[in-house]
Amino acid sequence: MKRFHVHIAVDDLAKSVDFYSKLFGQTPSVERADYAKWMLDEPRVNFAVSARGHAVGVNHFGFQAEDAQELQELRQRAAAAAGDSVLDQGDTTCCYAMGNKHWTVDPSGLAWEHYHTVGETPEFGVEMVSESGACCLPVVATSGEACCVPGTQAGGCCN
């Protein structure tokens, strides 16, 4: 069964961890110096916050698949919704986890990821960052090259 995923960028991780721990009635299942994650069962949500220099607010949404077959079904849905604008990252390290994932963007520019986690890692992973330091969640631009969410990279292929 898939789990809904929300990742929010915050400016004060300690205050956010305190707030969400009280709001959810539980402490994070993963907590690092720049990241925290709650795996909630009711409702079934993977809720993450991070303080990594991104603009405060929603960073992205997604679905966490239970297995490779579920991830493939999500990939088919992403392709049906976004056509060629799906970026397959394949095996990757992100948010202190190892897994397989792909990304797309909705018509309003909100990033969506679908992924299957296969393990934990002590590294956050490599983020795509623009020259201005802004967040660059990967999607495929009209040129077919990997790029960032529209409007986040000055002079980039997605503006």
Image: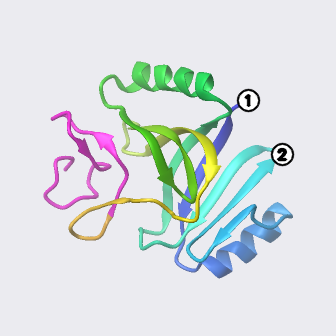
Q: Give how far apart the Cα atoms at labels 1 and 2 are.
A: 13 Å
The residue labelled by disc 2 is: 42
Can you give x and y, in whole percent of width and height, for residue 121 in the image?
A: 58, 59
Is 103 situated above or below 17? above
Can you give x and y, in whole percent of width and height, for residue 146 in the image?
A: 25, 42
Can you give x and y, in whole percent of width and height, for residue 147 in the image?
A: 25, 47
Query: Are there few (<14), some (14-19), or many (20+) residues within 10 Å of tag 2?
Result: few
Which colouring convention does the figure follow?
Answer: rainbow
On the picture, is 138 further left or further right than 73? left
Q: Residue drawn 63% across and 48% down?
A: 119
N-term-proximal mark, 1 vs 2: 1
Whether 137 is among the magenta residues is yes
Nearer to us in this view, 128 or 159: 128
Q: Secondary structure at mark 2?
A: loop
Whether 117 is among the magenta residues is no
Q: Residue drawn 51% across and 57% down?
A: 58
Question: Looking at the magenta stretch, what is its main secondary structure?
Answer: loop
Which residues fall within the magenta stretch?
135-159
- The quadrant in which residue 133 appears is bottom left
Is 50 situated above or below 153? below
Nearer to us in this view, 108 or 138: 138
Of circles 1 and 2, the one toward us is 1
Q: Residue drawn 56% across and 28% down?
A: 71
Q: Residue drawn 66% across and 55% down?
A: 47
On the picture, is 153 further left or further right than 36? left
Which amino acid lies under the numbered mark 2 shown in the image of this protein? Glu
Q: Secondary structure at mark 1?
A: loop
The residue labelled by disc 1 is: 1
